[in-house]
Image (spheres, grey):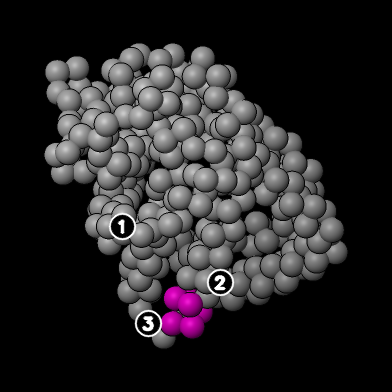
């Protein structure tokens, strides 16, 4: 039922997807410009070097001789490629200081971009929560500004934590599957990598699932919400995990299909929609477990089997 209700809430709040799309595009354009400015000097120097030009010339000669059917010249072109590639690696080694600083700059911009994207996710969650709790149409931009302090504090904790988790998981999976299991066929290794990556993402979603709802709907402080989300007692963790596995697989399939079959055009809608459906599931899961009633749409209200009576403080706080 959680999955079904999440989809209904997502459809009822689909308009927020477009607003979130515009926000994320603005953030991505700014971040892309900064990354290009950081990477340009090194990339320009690399592509303009004699070593790179020699490698490019060797590849062109190899392809030309291969197409025209001159096997005698293939050996010479192959040797040129090897020598040029070795020289290019030496060039990179001599300029490793610029490369390291460039990588650090790109990582920093990426983290800042994730931080600002997270502010949008917080605003979208607050807008959807208002629709679920009161069926109120809250403006996206005003909600973003109104919740700026809380969303900044949340993302200052969430972004570094999830970045470290992702870096650790994906690096570990790469070395485990593509290095330690190099004896397996490549398609099988790719299958294992994607499968374990989906499980890793789902585990992360399970243990951070209640963080935003506790802040936005539960009116918890940052510390209390942080401790609450990692406390899995009585939260049907396996059921939540199984739902997340299905949702993550569907999101992967839809986004990959959108990129392949529409040359990326449909991804403009499917990517922000992916964030929206995850937020909807988080909120539905929280409302159901806390036995709170909520709107599926204008005419449908989901009520718990035993409705909890609000305290005087909760009533006047609008909870």
x, y percentage for residue 243?
Answer: 25, 52
Give the magenta-colored segment's residue range: 176-181
Q: Would you name the residue on which mark 3 appears?
A: 184
Camera-side mark, 2 or 3: 3
- Farthest residue to the front: give it: 312
Camera-side mark, 3 or 1: 1
Q: Is 24 on the left-hand or right-hand side of 296?
A: right
Q: Is residue 220 visible?
A: yes
Assign the C terminus to one quadrant of the image: top left
The residue sitting at 56% across, 32% down in the picture is 151
Q: Is 193 on the left-hand or right-hand side of 304?
A: right
Q: Would you name the residue on which mark 2 appears?
A: 74
Mark 2 neighbour class, 10 Å CA radius: few under 14, some 14 to 19, many 20 or more: some
Mark 3 neighbour class, 10 Å CA radius: few under 14, some 14 to 19, many 20 or more: few
Tag 1 secondary structure: loop
**Predominant SS of the magenta segment:** helix
Q: Would you name the residue on which mark 1 appears?
A: 234
Name which of mark 2 and mark 3 comes first in the sequence.
Answer: 2
The residue sitting at 85% across, 64% down in the picture is 94
Tell me the quarter of the picture where residue 242 sits: bottom left
User: Could you tell me how far apart the alpha carbons at marks 1 and 2 are, in whole angstroms?
Assistant: 67 Å
Tag 3 secondary structure: loop
Q: Which mark is residue 301?
A: none
Tag 2 secondary structure: helix
Name which of mark 3 and mark 1 comes first in the sequence.
Answer: 3
């Amino acid at each position: 039922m959680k999955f079904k209700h999440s989809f209904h809430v997502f459809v009822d709040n689909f308009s927020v997807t477009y607003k979130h799309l515009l926000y994320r595009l603005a953030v991505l354009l700014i971040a892309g410009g900064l990354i290009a400015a950081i990477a340009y000097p090194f990339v320009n120097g690399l592509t303009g070097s004699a070593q790179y030009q020699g490698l490019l010339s060797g590849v062109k000669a190899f392809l030309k001789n291969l197409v025209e059917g001159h096997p005698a010249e293939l050996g010479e072109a192959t040797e040129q490629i090897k020598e040029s590639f070795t020289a290019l690696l030496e060039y990179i080694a001599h300029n490793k200081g610029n490369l390291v600083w460039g990588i650090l700059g790109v990582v920093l911009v990426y983290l800042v971009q994730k931080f600002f994207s997270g502010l949008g996710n917080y605003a979208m969650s607050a807008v959807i929560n208002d629709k679920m709790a009161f069926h109120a149409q809250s403006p996206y931009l005003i909600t973003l500004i109104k919740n700026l302090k809380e969303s900044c504090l949340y993302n200052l904790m969430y972004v570094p934590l999830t970045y470290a988790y992702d870096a650790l998981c994906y690096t570990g999976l790469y070395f485990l599957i593509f290095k330690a299991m190099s004896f397996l066929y490549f398609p099988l290794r790719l299958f294992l990598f994607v499968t374990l990556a989906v499980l890793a993402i789902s585990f992360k979603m399970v243990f951070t699932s209640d963080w935003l709802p506790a802040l936005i709907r539960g009116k918890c402080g940052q510390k209390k919400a942080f401790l609450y989300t990692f406390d899995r007692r009585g939260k049907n963790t396996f059921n939540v995990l199984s739902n997340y596995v299905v949702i993550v697989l569907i999101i992967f399939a839809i986004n990959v299909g959108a990129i392949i079959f529409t040359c990326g055009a449909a991804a403009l809608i499917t990517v922000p929609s992916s964030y929206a459906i995850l937020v909807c599931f988080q909120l539905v899961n929280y409302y159901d477990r806390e036995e709170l009633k909520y709107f599926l749409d204008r005419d449908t209200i989901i009520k718990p089997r035993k409705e909890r009576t609000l305290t005087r403080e909760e009533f006047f706080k609008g909870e």
